[in-house]
Image (tube, rainbow, N blue to C red):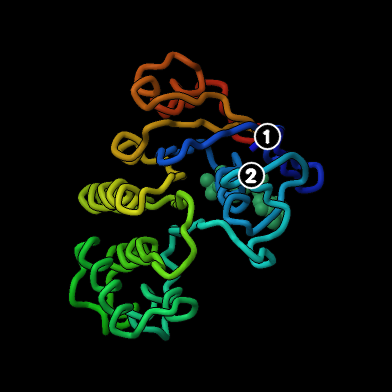
Amino acid sequence: MENLSMRWGSNIVLDDIDLRLQAGERLVVVGPSGSGKSTLLRLLAGLQLPTSGRLRIHGEPQTYLRLDQRHPPDVRLVFQNPALLASLSVKENVGFLLYRFSRLSEQEIAERVDMALQAVGLAGIEEQMPGELSGGMQKRVSFARALIEDPTAPQSLTPLLLFDEPTAGLDPVACTRIEDLIVRTSELVQASSLVVSHVMSTIDRCAERVALLYDGRFRWIGAVEDFRVSTNPYVVQFRSGSLQGPMQPAEN
Ligand SMILES: Nc1ncnc2c1ncn2[C@@H]1O[C@H](COP(=O)(O)OP(=O)(O)OP(=O)(O)O)[C@@H](O)[C@H]1O
């Protein structure tokens, strides 16, 4: 991202930001509500275009929405709500892209789905419907979907995985399981990952770098080890959850 801005009318959500994600790294983006984290994800997912500035993925300028791109980059989204298709079985959800676009046989797709489900600890639930699963299981199914790759597709570059608040509202043990999965999924498909989260354990377990977004700008970016000890006032306020500090609700 270079000099990238996103405005809604007079509301400047992202203000001339620069960010470079290294191949294979895991970056966690934090920031208070309304600071533009979801907007960042939507731009990377090709669901909206910036008002100004440049966004490049694998070096390619992103000037069209993803749906309008003939050769879209390999960007995979794991939403806060798993967004599984309720009328399709787990197998059909996980293998969705392969069923639609690949030249693999039914048997080959079934084997790949099986491997992806095993990787997230959910072997044997292929024929179940999403509605029969718990919320946590649905989330893991959406991770399995992000693991699926098409070996018949042209050799692709490092995939980009986008996680939108993957551990919000989970109990601590479920959080750990999902955090481990984020790391494992990223390593298995050798992806770069951008995780939006407020959860400290998710930052600790998943991040290699942390970026703190507030009022349209990155106020701090650095290694997770430095995030734990930084005296930057934004980082200190985020870590302590204090009401005192530079980050205040918009209405104040
Ligand atoms: N479609 C839209 N039209 C107008 N304003 C929008 C639109 N989408 C987002 N915004 C505004 O952009 C700002 C940033 O929103 P965004 O959802 O990116 O924040 P966030 O950091 O993800 O917040 P949260 O943590 O609460 O999800 C908000 O002020 C929001 O009102």
Q: Between tags 1 and 2, which lies in front?
A: 2
Amino acid type, mark 1? Glu
Residue 50 position in % (x across, y down): 72, 47
Of the numbered discs 1 and 2, the one sitting upstream in the chain is 1
Against 122, is 89 above or below? below
For label 1, the crowd category at 10 Å Cα-Cα, with few meaning under 14, some 14 to 19 and many 20 or more, is some
Amino acid type, mark 2? Arg
Q: Where on the picture, by quarter, is residue 102?
A: bottom left
Residue found at x 29% / y 38%? 205
Q: Residue furthest top?
A: 231
Residue found at x 65% / y 67%? 67
Disc 2 on helix, strand or loop? strand
For label 2, the crowd category at 10 Å Cα-Cα, with few meaning under 14, some 14 to 19 and many 20 or more, is few
Residue 46 position in % (x across, y down): 63, 57
Residue picked out by circle 1 = 2
The CA distance from mark 1 to mark 2 is 8 Å
Name the residue nearer the viewer: 72 or 242: 72
Q: Where on the picture, by quarter, is residue 20?
A: top right
Name the residue nearer the viewer: 142 or 58: 58
Q: Which mark is residue 56?
A: 2
Q: Is the Cβ of the residue at disc 1 closer than 8 Å to that at disc 2? A: yes
Q: Is mark 1 within 8 Å of ligand 1?
A: no
